[in-house]
Image (spheres, rainbow, N blue to C red):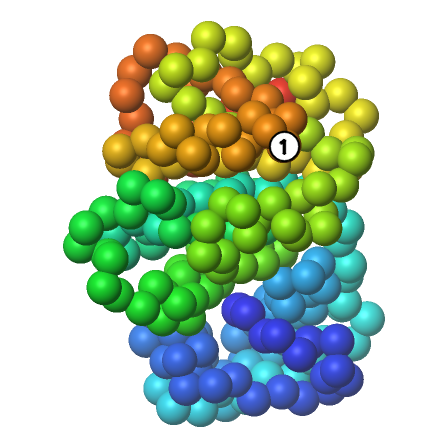
Amino acid sequence: MYFKDLSNISSVCELDNAQSAHIATVLRLKEGDEIELFDGEGLSCKANITVSSKRNAQLELIPSSKETQNLSNQLVGVLPYIKKDNMSFMVQKLTELGVTRMIFFKPDRLDQSLVKKDLSKLKDKLQEVAIGACKQSGINFLPKLEHCDDLTEVFNKPSIAASNNFACFFDLEATNHLSSNDLADKDEYIFITGPESGFSDEERFTMLEKNISVKSLGKNILRAETAPIISATLIQSFLGNI
C-alpha cells in the first residue's frame, strides 16, 4: 500500500478512506494480517493491520522491517496529451516498466477533443493510476508527473539540458534505430513521442536544434499510447532491466 509519509512514522499509522477501502474490499485483509507499505521513493516497511474497515484502516509498523532501495537508472518519458482513457493506460504501463519521470506537453497537433479542456485537471487522476500500477507491479518508486504547455517549456528544464544524458525522439520519418551504444555511460535516458497525428515541422526543428537524436521504432504506425510503451521497453531492454 502507498503511504507517502512513511519516513516520518515510527510505529502507528492510519490510512485515508481510499486506501482503507482498498484493503477491506479489494484485498479483503483483516485485523492481524500483514501488509507492506511503500512511499514511492524507495522506502518500504511491513506492518500489521490493527483496524480494518471500508472507512478506516490502522496499521502498526513491524520494527526493523524498513528497507531502502536506490534507483540504478533515471528513465524519462516526454509524452503528448492524448485522450484520457488512452493516457491512463499509457501511464499505467510506463509505471510498470520503471519510467521514473513523465513530462506531459501539449503537442502542436493536439487532438481536437482536448483543445478546450483544462488538461491540468488530469494530474490527480494520472497520479492515482501511477500509484495503482506501483501496487500491482511491486515497484517502490512512484514516477514524478510534470506538465508543460509545449516542447519549448520541456527543454527549458535543467535536467533535460544536462550534458550527461541521452535524449531521443521517435519519429516515423527516422531511419536510424536505437542501439546499446547510444545508451552507454549516461545518468539519464529521455525519450520523446508524439500524438496520433505526429510531430509538427516546428516541433521536429526544435528537437533537432537541441541536438536530440531522432530514432525509428520500425515500419509499423503505432498508436500514441503504444509508442511510449515500446520506447520504454526498448530502452530498459538495452539497459538490462528487462
Question: For this rendering, which residue is in front, 227 or 116?
Answer: 116
62 over 79 or under it: above or below: below
Q: Is residue 111 left or right of residue 66?
A: left
Which residue is tagged 1?
Answer: 210
Q: Is residue 140 left or right of residue 227?
A: right
Question: For this rendering, which residue is in front, 90 or 77?
Answer: 77
164 over 157 or under it: above or below: above
Residue at image position (46%, 8%) is 175
Q: Count neighbours of disc 1 (C-alpha within 10 A) and say few if under 14, some if 14 to 19, many if 20 or more.
A: few
Count of all numbered marks drawn on residues in the image:
1
Question: For this rendering, which residue is in front, 207 or 126?
Answer: 207
Residue at image position (38%, 90%) is 55
Q: Residue furthest top?
A: 175
Question: For this rendering, which residue is in front, 55 or 159?
Answer: 159
Residue at image position (62%, 55%) is 141
Residue at image position (31%, 68%) is 118
State which quadrant residue 2 falls in.
bottom right
- Whether residue 200 appears in this view of the structure is yes
What residue type is disc 1 on?
Lys
Instruction: State the image coordinates of residue 51 (x, y, percent, origin top left).
Output: 50, 90
Instruction: State the image coordinates of residue 140 (x, y, percent, origin top left).
Output: 62, 56
The quadrant in which the C terminus is found is top right
State which quadrant residue 216 falls in.
top left
Instruction: State the image coordinates of residue 6 (x, y, percent, origin top left).
Output: 68, 76
